[in-house]
């Protein structure tokens, strides 16, 4: 598609956008009495206006029915998790029984590592990406120690080649093959939170299986952002959160995928709780855990209905828009952002987009590596009414989300970026800005 650097072009794109009306269904944060340019849905998605009524419904049932709400409520709490199966499955390309909404991401990661990381003295390694989100690093480090191995020896972190920002699929495949005798698990982000790179999950899964390993993904930044086919790719397990692209609120409920091939395996170790037990017998209070088939068998506790209610409202909107349409708009919107940044004519030593250029290797986030004055630039953008984030040591992440961001948002952001850059450059020639990035705090 051919882009133009004008407000008129941006507005005409919005006018022709079939998803345009979805923006009205979200609250846009206000800065200085005006709608902010919110480009931070990769960290926390905006609040759907329908969430309040969904929470109200559960509060009312609790108010009016007390404990009877478990069975007599409008959406009985006893079966509340079933309300998500179909829609959640569409987001990640799964069968309904392969997904479950529960807990939070890191909790789910630990639970699934209990089942799918079963190291032996010969096969104990985990292959992961260097610079994975810290929570994943801590989960892997402590799981490995829990099994009596040393993280430095058992965790193999793959780094991009010198001078490159992203991992090459061929290098990932080669590393897996080279460790075919010792690798137990491949565990990577679906989309790296820092660089914005989307990994080739199908190829990695294939390579992992060929090496005799199991394969799992953290889809925090991929779910609701890129097209996924977890079932077809035969991914063993995955976890994600619902507060980013799925707009389900801070600390919102997490989700997990377990491939059908593991649904009935009685030999899989797991940490169990009563909500994963056969529901027909759950209240018989008997000894002996009998897991529900599928991902539901990994549930521990009765669901956190209030956060699940927010997710239900948000997921309904998401499902109405649909992943294919969202992804199509996302590619155009991110492409427009990239085009406008390139129009600024900056060199790679000034401001570099470290997210891959190929649409298949990125979602809607572009990570801007700013070599000098990065933090000062970020603060200027913030002061001008743009909400985005800064990730240490020197990246500004910008995420135009197709569900509620517009081409006009992207155009206005680019104008503010250009103006802020010029002002900073003028200030630094006059010696008014410290030349290096400061790393005092992160957002
Ligand atoms: C890739 C990734 N993994 C894990 C987490 C942590 O998730 P949670 O706090 O829901 O466990 C996040 C973000 O918070 C993330 O971006
Ligand atoms: N939950 C949060 C609470 C506070 C600040 C950030 C977060 C994030 O989710 C960060 C996000 N995971 C990231 O990709 O950086």
Image: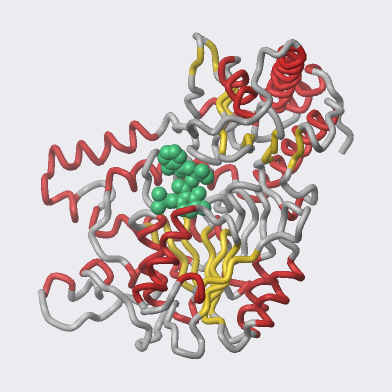
Q: Say which of 373 and 273 sits in front.
A: 373
Q: Is residue 274 above or below residue 225?
A: below
For image coordinates 52% across by 71% down, the residue present is 155
For image coordinates 62% across by 78% down, the residue present is 208
**x and y percentages locating residue 144 in the rendered image:** 41, 73
Q: Is residue 439 above or below residue 376?
A: below
Q: Say which of 391 and 45 sits in front.
A: 391
**x and y percentages locating residue 339 in the rendered image:** 82, 33
For image coordinates 69% across by 38% down, the residue present is 369
**x and y percentages locating residue 27 in the rendered image:** 47, 25
Q: Say which of 230 and 422 sits in front.
A: 422
Quadrant where the N terminus is found in the figure: top right
Side of 346 where 362 appears, left or right: left
Corner quadrant of residue 120: bottom left
Corner quadrant of residue 385: top right
Corner quadrant of residue 338: top right
For image coordinates 84% across by 33% down, the residue present is 347
Q: Is residue 198 above or below residue 126?
A: above
**x and y percentages locating residue 214 in the rendered image:** 53, 79
């Amino acid at each position: 598609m051919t882009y133009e650097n004008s407000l008129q072009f941006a507005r005409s794109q919005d006018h022709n956008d079939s998803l345009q009306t979805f923006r009205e269904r979200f609250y846009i944060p206000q800065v200085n009495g005006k709608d902010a340019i919110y480009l931070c849905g990769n960290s926390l998605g905006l609040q759907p206006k329908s969430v309040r009524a969904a929470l109200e419904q559960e509060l009312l049932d609790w108010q009016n029915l007390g404990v009877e709400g478990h069975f007599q409520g409008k959406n009985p709490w006893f079966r509340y998790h079933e309300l998500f199966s179909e829609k959640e499955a569409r987001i990640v390309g799964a069968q309904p029984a392969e997904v479950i909404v529960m807990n939070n991401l890191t909790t789910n990661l630990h639970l699934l590592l209990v089942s799918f990381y079963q190291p032996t003295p010969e096969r104990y390694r985990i292959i992961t990406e260097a610079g994975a989100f810290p929570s994943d690093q801590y989960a892997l480090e402590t799981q490995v120690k829990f099994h009596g191995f040393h993280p430095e020896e058992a965790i193999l972190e793959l780094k991009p080649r010198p001078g490159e920002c992203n991992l090459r699929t061929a290098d990932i495949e080669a590393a897996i093959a080279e460790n075919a005798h010792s690798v137990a698990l491949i565990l990577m982000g679906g989309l790296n939170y820092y660089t914005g790179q989307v990994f080739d999950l199908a190829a990695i899964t294939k390579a992992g299986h060929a090496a005799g390993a199991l394969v799992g993904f953290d889809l925090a930044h991929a779910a609701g952002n890129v097209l996924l086919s977890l079932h077809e790719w035969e991914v063993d397990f995955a976890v994600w959160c619902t507060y980013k692209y799925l707009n389900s609120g801070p600390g919102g409920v997490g989700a997990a995928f377990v491939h059908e091939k593991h649904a009935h395996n009685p030999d899989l170790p797991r940490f169990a709780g009563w909500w994963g037990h056969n529901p027909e017998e759950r209240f018989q209070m008997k000894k002996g855990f009998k897991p529900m088939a599928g991902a539901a068998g990994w549930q521990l506790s009765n669901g956190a209905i209030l956060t699940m209610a927010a997710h239900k409202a948000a997921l309904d909107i998401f499902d109405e828009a649909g992943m294919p349409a969202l992804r199509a708009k996302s590619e155009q919107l991110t492409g427009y952002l990239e085009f406008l940044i390139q129009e600024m004519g900056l060199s790679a030593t000034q401001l570099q987009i470290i997210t891959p250029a190929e649409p298949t290797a990125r979602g809607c986030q572009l990570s801007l590596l700013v070599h000098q004055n990065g933090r000062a630039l970020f603060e200027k953008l913030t002061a001008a009414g743009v909400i985005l984030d800064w990730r240490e040591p020197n990246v500004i992440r910008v995420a135009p989300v197709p569900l509620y961001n517009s081409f006009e948002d992207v155009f206005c952001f680019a104008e503010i970026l250009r103006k802020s850059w010029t002002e900073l450059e003028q200030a630094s020639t006059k010696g008014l800005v410290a030349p290096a990035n400061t790393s005092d705090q992160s957002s």
